[in-house]
Amino acid sequence: MLHTSRRRRLFAGAATIAIGALVLTACASQREDGGDSAEPSDVDSTFVFGASADLSSLDPAFANDGETFRVARQMFEGLVGTEPGTADPAPLLAESWDQSEDGLSYTFQLKEGVTFHDGTDFNAEAVCFNFDRQNNFTGVAQSESLSYYWGKLMRGYADTGTSIYGGCEANGDYEATITLTEPFAGFIPALSLPSFSIQSPTALEEYAADEVGGTSEAPTLSEYAQGHPTGTGPFKFDSWSPGESSTLSAYEDYWGEQGDVQEIIFQVIGDTTARRQALESGSIDGYDLAAPADLGALEEAGFTLVNRDPFNVLYLAMNQAQPSLADIKVRQAIAHAIDKEQLVTQVLPEGTEIASQFMPPSVIGWNDSVTEYEYDPEAATALLAEAGYTDANPLSITFNYPVNVSRPYMPNPEQIYTNLSSQLEAVGIQLTPVSNEWGEYLDLMQGSSDHGIHLLGWTGDYNDPDNFVGTFFGAPSNEWGFDNPELFSTLTTARGLATAEEQEAAYLDANAQIMEFLPGIPLAHPVPTLAFNERVTSYPASPVQDEVYNMVELSE
Amino acid sequence: MLRTIGKRLLLLIPTLIGLSILLFLWVRALPGGPAVALLGERATPEAIEEINRLYGFDRSPLEQYFIWAGRLLSGDFGQSIQTRAPVIEEFLRRFPATFELSVFAIVVAVGVGVPLGYLAARKHGKATDHITVAASLLGITIPVFFLAFILKWVFAVQLGWLPSEGRQDPRIDATHYTGFYVFDGIITGEWDAAWDAFLHLILPGLALASIPLAIIVRITRASVLEVQNSDYVRTGLAKGVSRGTIRQRFILRNALLPVVTTIGLQVGLLISGAVLTETVFAYPGIGSFLARAIFTRDYPVLQGFIIFIAIGYALINLLVDISYSFIDPRVRVS
């Protein structure tokens, strides 16, 4: 159990501090004698992961952030999971499913012999209990900071009258039918989100999971969400020290395979540099979103780097509320002025793909023949001249970018800004740089129209085009500052289509339309990188972070 | 004596009211609100509106202030927006960590600073004095976060001698009763847990101690020098009082007064150092939480924590004043 680096540190620490050196070494060796007997395995089965933030809740139905999902995925399973290494849906607690002809009912055949961590059985009733529960959320529980995904995907709750959830029926122990009132082609992929995990009805009731605080001004977590999460996953909950760490251990009656990892500790280390140093000093086994600038040094020092397939897009938005940017010629000129190849090779992590549209190629409806604006500074200058901007009267715009932040799609905003600004200035565009801290930045981009061109992006939650282009261009917004009813209606229609085939055709069209209209310039799909101690020999990287640690392989 | 304390405590009330108003204005002057920080990239205007309504940020600042102040009087500090837990709970949860770290830092600062300052004064003008003065100057000028970073890089990352972050190795199964990890380890007899928690204090503690240590050295040195050259010491020496007695009864005791004041002030300042140090060492105390609250615009946490810290600061100053009267009976009279 005792990790080698810790052992080293205990001894070294003892040597460092002169006082009581003898007593201390005695302490360290005492622990060594006592600690190893329980675990016969030859690897250190404790896996410590450096989390960038603490959990927000132990109840995945009330969570929507990556760090909470990361932990939830170890303890919980939904009807649908993902195909390893992709964002595509795959059977998990449901072994198979059929869709009715009208596209509104889904019948799931459930896995048998699965138990929750409290020993109760997983069955069709448990499935219906979970879906009904979320649809019946009331008051504070409906708030977007809590049940975000239910509200978003089911478009409401039982008492709001807008929910497209029709009901759930158990047709026996291991078959359940879920009915929707409107077609929703993204339903199956959406079920792979941890928010739709199946939790133990017994535990949910016993620990009053729906009681999320009395008043709307002071929402608080339920007893369940603070210490009794009960799912069917390979790991069960042990403890949570808010702000410090959370610990899970292997669930001995898990229906699937247990791997090398018997205990997982998520240690909260907020600062990116601190996470890197924690890996270097041996106190954690790995962390997510390694900074591109650190990759070379980490690799040289023998750490294992694992790239996730990018499921994101980084773009340069052009706010059409600014009169100059409302001119399509100006937008086209900016597009021709940018050398994406240069951007990708110079400042983005190795493996990053160039983006041609506002979604990654693995998403349904990605169009391989959209209008592309190749790097052509001369064309850019000519277009600018046509729009009335010359050397004597240059185009002058603000360029907003965030500072002190790292996102999967934008690991190093400052460097991206520097690279792009020199390219734009090369064709004679005058830029006024404006940088802001992250929260302030988002506020400015989304809450006001006082910005010109800016950097932003998005990582997808599950394989669904609406999750990309629908959220960007589905309705008028401050971020883009345009009103294009034709595009809005194309996207709204596409979202409501019943089957993936119909959706594909609709999104192929939508993407073509978007790139013709050119509201912004999709730049790249940057590769997010995870860094591990070299004892981690295999890690199941997933584009949507569906990474369950019973698949982690350790060598020592 | 009691009257003085009572008066001081009463004076605390207008101070806190003034502070709460300034604080409230400052927090709301921070650009960007908690809603965007909470909801991220794709927050819809409706969602932002909803969060603002939920926490009452859609009301006028004046209205918000009175609601907040009214609740404050009944002991309700509100809920953290980030963690959704009551602010007071968050504070109490993290207080032991910062307290433990501060005690370590102040023990180092006083334990090393006073003797060193005294030694420098005794060796006035000699090499020891020059080296001490130069080192203390360095201690004051190096930014805390930079020193923290260097200490960590050398002793944790490169040499691997000490832990690089946190309060305790999470692999250790330690029992916690009080939240003071070293103390908990000692009372439960879990020596390895106590030792591990102690090791976790060293680097952040040294970083945090750097400025107070340097200041204490300088003040002690200056104070001892002044007393050393004072008339009564010279008179004492002339009258044949032994050097040992002079040092103990006259010099040290009289020189201590400004030193105690300085220590009191430094204790209050520790918290600002803790914001940086705790962030560098991912040490889960008040400082790192406060730093995160600034980034996420967690208004209730910022307001509540700073009020708690202000009360603590005022109480420490009161303690310092009381301790004067024990060191110097003349203060008691006035």
Image: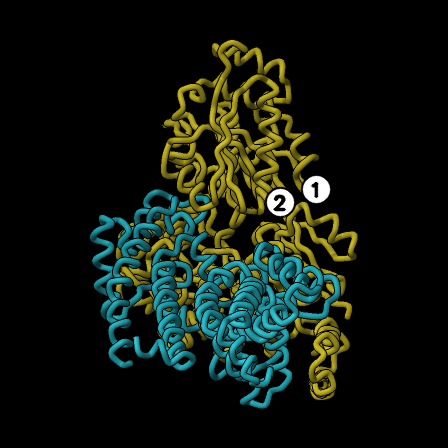
Chain colours: A yellow, B cyan
Name the amino acid, label 1: Gly
Chain of the residue under label 2 = A
Question: In the rendered view, does B47 fall on the left or right side of B115?
Answer: left
Q: Tag 1, which chain?
A: A
For image coordinates 40% across by 62% down, the residue present is: A131
Residue indicated by mark 2: A310
For label 1, the crowd category at 10 Å Cα-Cα, with few meaning under 14, some 14 to 19 and many 20 or more, is some
**Discs 1 and 2 share one subunit:** yes
Q: Position of residue B181 (x, y in %)?
A: 54, 79
Seen from the viewer's position, the closer of residues B49 and A278 is A278
**Number of labelled discs?**
2
Residue A520 in sight from this viewpoint: yes
> In the depicted view, which residue is nearer to us: A468 or A401?
A401
Structural distance between the alpha carbons of marks 1 and 2: 9 Å
Circles 1, 2 touching at the beta carbon (< 8 Å): yes
Residue position for label 1 = A351
Q: Residue furthest front?
A: B238
Where disc 2 sits, the SS reads loop
* Residue at the spot 28% in from the left edge and 62% down from the top edge: B15
B293 and A3: which one is in front?
B293
In the image, what residue type sits under mark 2? Answer: Pro
x and y percentages locating residue B10 in the rendered image = 24, 70
Q: Determine whether the residue tagged by mark 1 lies in a helix, strand or loop.
A: loop
Query: Would residue B19 be found to the left or right of residue B280 on screen?
Result: left
Does residue B141 lie above or below A210 as drawn? above
